[in-house]
Amino acid sequence: MSETIILKNVRPWGETATDVTIEAGRIRSVSAVAQPNGAKIIDGEGAILLPGFVEAHTHLDKTLYGMPWNPNAVGSTLVEKITNERNSKARLGLDPARQSARQVALSVANGSTHIRSHVDIDTEHGLKGVEGVMATREKYADVIDLEIVAFPQSGMLIRQGTRELMDEALSLGAEVVGGLDPCSMDLDPKGHLNVIFGLAEKHGKPIDIHLHELGELGAFSMRLIIDRTRAHAMAGKVTVSHAFCLGHNDYLAIGRLLDDLAEAGIHIMTTGPAGYPCPPLIRTLDAGITVCSGSDGIRDCWSPYGNADMLERAIFLGMRNDLDRDADIRRAVEVVTVGGAKAMNVERYGLAAGDTADLVLIDGETLAEAVVSRRLRPLTMKRGKVVARNGAALFEVD
Amino acid sequence: MSETIILKNVRPWGETATDVTIEAGRIRSVSAVAQPNGAKIIDGEGAILLPGFVEAHTHLDKTLYGMPWNPNAVGSTLVEKITNERNSKARLGLDPARQSARQVALSVANGSTHIRSHVDIDTEHGLKGVEGVMATREKYADVIDLEIVAFPQSGMLIRQGTRELMDEALSLGAEVVGGLDPCSMDLDPKGHLNVIFGLAEKHGKPIDIHLHELGELGAFSMRLIIDRTRAHAMAGKVTVSHAFCLGHNDYLAIGRLLDDLAEAGIHIMTTGPAGYPCPPLIRTLDAGITVCSGSDGIRDCWSPYGNADMLERAIFLGMRNDLDRDADIRRAVEVVTVGGAKAMNVERYGLAAGDTADLVLIDGETLAEAVVSRRLRPLTMKRGKVVARNGAALFEVD
């Protein structure tokens, strides 16, 4: 990518219009250019410029997006949903490579440039999910940065052999160690966390653990995670996803937990779920915690909702947390951009000279207006290459 | 409207495809038509057919939709928001007639055929809001059925003269008596409710009261409303909007309240707010209560969110209430259609022979798929007349 590109007339974060000069996939400068000197010009037409959205929590391997509609009549408990899903995969002909590619195209169309995907590992399907998403990671390496979390969705200690599969997935190249509800899933919080942190240590990889456990139970598990993060010196390398227990209505207890999470350097991922208690966004950010967000599962055997649109995710974060002020809506946008990048340790992310040219343009009068109107994305750029135009990916998937 | 129209190849509620014959603004039959006999044919192309959406709770008079973006930096208390709004109207040049027309066009574009709008009445702006929305009601009578609630947004007893303005609005033709938080706004629940129910009796009109009060306070006000509804024999004529207190986490107490609301014939309006406790949808419906929904304020001085899309509202109801099953999503769609019609006492509403031809077509594979994908509305029809095509109104507003 030796060509010089000038992205003319764009407004970084919705502020004053300027030009962005891009060279070799990086931002060379952010300032008005009088003489293009033969550079390729892309007219931004005054659109808002953001660094690409970061989809920091999804499940690429099991979306049903693009497949015939799968009517849902599943029970409402976690175990019913997990069991139904494990049993449905073969019946529905769910191909993790094909399905993850479809969701990647949707994400890119909506302006995402980075994805962290949890991928199921269990003794029934083995590493099929991981292999499928790895194929997508390789095939679409020039349009998305994709990180795989080895995720024991069906339990780890309760299904003998899962731990070894996790180990294998991490050896094969999964970037992150996953975990799930240490108390309620494996019924052995100490055992579960010892394995997770042991794998992280062995492979020198970060951790991202699903924690749906509510109230005191979730707070108990969270305390164990904080203790181990300190003991293993993993500050900045542990993310707790969902963290519903931080939505517990106990001002003092939650305050102490938030302070300890911040001090331990643990990141929080929240989707801003309407139907569950969840981390109070502004208070969590104000505690100094890095907060990222994601779509979670998109149109899968759990739930039919979702569309991989991280701008819409900012609306959900806003509505869930009663963010009406423009300044607060900007903080929600920061969660789906810089927060995600920080949680995933993405280097050279942003809109400064030297940063990777991972960018999205959004129509709109102001940043807040663009969010609430869920405005069109005229362009997504990955390492200086245009990969989507007007909400449609410029590449084909099966 | 003497012309006969045949809406070919549509799927009522997403079920088997059929044809709908429309005459004089009403449905004459719902069955396959072999011989059109010169009737005008509209090809539904297999779209899903629903009765028009019912926007049962909004604030047409004060949307800023279509005006320059108004940055929001307002405080978070109810009184701060109300005061800011009252003071902003003149500053922003908010014209209730123009603004309500803009929102009507948006509603119709998205498939709504009925709107209940609360309209502010206070001693500062008098009846300007009511007059403006009445002008819109008249001007757009052939595209929307619009019902006006005389709404004392800034308090009634605490602002002398408001009660008389309410009385005047009802004499002028406002269809519904509004009210607001009997304890927290007027600080006199007995006095507030006596005036509301007195006005309803005097004018022979129904009541729709905003109740944001939480927990025990809201339950106390709710009890007073139930008592008065019984005493005034107003079963089927009282709606409690928001009813956040029904989201209180007390299974037994809420169960008793729901049973009593059902017995008293009181309707509940919920927007499915992500950031507030709210009525549990399925449990409220199962108690036998009519539930309707609405957009609430759209892009106004309170909050920038909203787009008058009642199909999206079904998503919000679904996500708020964890409705993943297709059958439950259908119940959410029933809330934004038949629930609203029942709460507003709309006659001849539905998809049966004899019902008014107030209809919306929605692309989609199944009803649930159409909801979660927020699919395009190819057509909105009001009394047999096509008023919107492909998500755009067929009439102009200022």
Image (spheres, coloured by chain):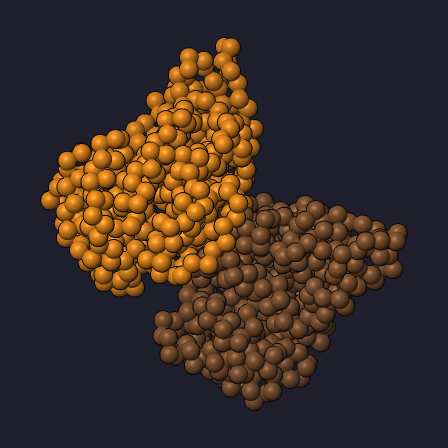
Chain colours: A brown, B orange
Q: Position of residue B120 (x, y in %)?
A: 32, 43
A102, above or below A229, in the image:
above
In this rendered view, identify the residue nearer to me: B273 or B126: B126
In this picture, residue A356 sits left or right of residue A62: right
Q: Dividing the image into 4 quarters, which one contains the N terminus of chain A? A: bottom right
Please name the residue shown 44% across and 35% down the image: B98
Residue ID at (53%, 83%): A263
Q: Judge whether residue A138 can be spotted in this image.
A: no
A48 or B131, which lies in front? B131
Q: Is residue A66 above or below residue A278?
A: above
Residue B164 picture location, percent across and down = 20, 40
Residue A145 coordinates in the image, percent (x, y): 71, 63
Q: Is residue B117 visible?
A: yes
Q: Residue at x 32, y 57 (%)?
A: B79
Answer with left or right where residue A62 lies relative to residue B38: right
Farthest residue, direction top: B37
Q: Residue at x 15, y 51 (%)?
A: B191
- Asked which quadrant contains residue B201, the reply is top left
- The vertical placement of A383 against B345, above or below, is below
**In the image shown, does A303 or A242 lie closer to the viewer?**
A242
* Residue occupying the far left of the picture: B231
Q: Position of residue A42 (x, y in %)?
A: 77, 49
Q: How many marks?
A: 0
Who is closer to the viewer here, A290 or A245? Answer: A290
